[in-house]
Amino acid sequence: MSKILLIAIYLFSGCTLADSVPQKWAKRTTPTVDLVPQSIGTYTNGCISGAVSLPLSGTGYQVMRLSRNRFYGHATLIQFIQQLGQVAADQQLGTLLIGDLGQARGGPTPSGHRSHQTGLDVDIWFLLSKQLDNRLLSANERETWGAPSVVDANSDTVDYRQWTQAHEKVLEAAARHPDVDRIFVNPSIKQELCTHKTAASAVWLRKIRPWWKHDDHFHVRLKCPKGNPYCQGQPAVPETDGCDASLAWWFSAEAKAPSKPGKPTPPPPLPALCEQVLNQ
């Protein structure tokens, strides 16, 4: 293939020779037109065709950081967020502030956010805005507001100046949703939930998984939807509630100061179907 022809192909596709793979995906600002959404690949190495845009405001929720254009996801994710917002409104828990879902066609992002690639992940802030009084945030507020940490780093506990029972109720409602596979939270938050566990709470508490950071938001990951044969899920979460020695490890010196990783390995190629999604 001649150099001139190669350049013509790149220009026609809206890319430049200097574009990285994540930049190519970020430039696809509209979803593909498909009647049935399809999540393809893994949560950290995939894409989505037929993504749906989450309305920027709805009952019980508002989307933040609109300039990032990451409010697209699988139809099941959009439904989940809207249903969780309805629960928050019905129980007067506060307005959910929604962070990243995914890009219009999924894929890797220029910011290096490894997951959120198949339209099945969403970040939800721990800032529950009860003070909104049903008003819409301005565009400037959506860009400049920050989510405070709800964890006291000095004591390995939640910060009770920020943490309320409403947070626990929102997490429970999210974890009980049948489409949810797991939810990532800071280990101190998992520990707080474990102090209130009951025999009944084990059903949903097992889905709450400790992970580094996640002190100002929680990360919801849905299961692969039915009828999405190219979606690759994760191994099932353990049947136990997770309030055992596995949780204690997160407060060890090893967990708090992990060894520095070596030279990062490049990500594997995206599934072949994603090339079609990118270039439609």
Image (spheres, grey):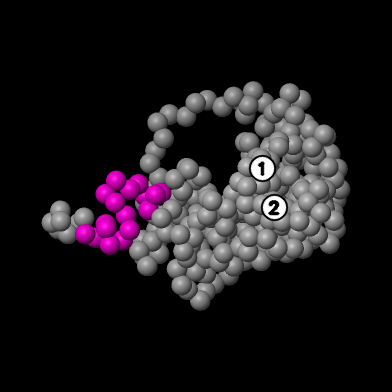
Mark 2–mark 1 distance (CA, rounded to whole Å): 10 Å
Q: Residues within 10 Å of mark 1 (few under 14, many from 20)?
A: few
Q: Quadrant of the C terminus?
A: bottom left
Magenta stretch holds residue 12: yes
Give, as a three-letter code, the residue at label 1: Trp
Total marks drawn? Answer: 2
Residue 94 x/y as whole percent: 80, 52
In screen coordinates, is 159 left or right of 221? Answer: right
Magenta residues, as a range? 8-24
User: Circle 2 is placed at which residue position?
Assistant: 137
In screen coordinates, is 174 left or right of 109? Answer: right
The residue closer to the viewer here, 30 or 242, is: 30
Q: Is residue 266 above or below residue 180?
A: above
Tell me, yes or no, whether the two marked residues, 2 and 1, touch with CB atoms within 8 Å.
yes
The residue closer to the viewer here, 277 or 8, is: 8
Residue 79 x/y as whole percent: 66, 66
Which residue is most to the left?
2
Under circle 1, the secondary element is loop
Magenta stretch holds residue 261: no
User: Circle 1 is placed at which residue position?
Assistant: 145
Q: Is residue 151 visible?
A: yes
Which residue is depicted at the point 55% across and 66% down?
A: 52
Which residue is most to the bottom?
35
Give, as a three-letter code, the residue at label 2: Leu
Q: Is residue 135 above or below residue 160?
A: below
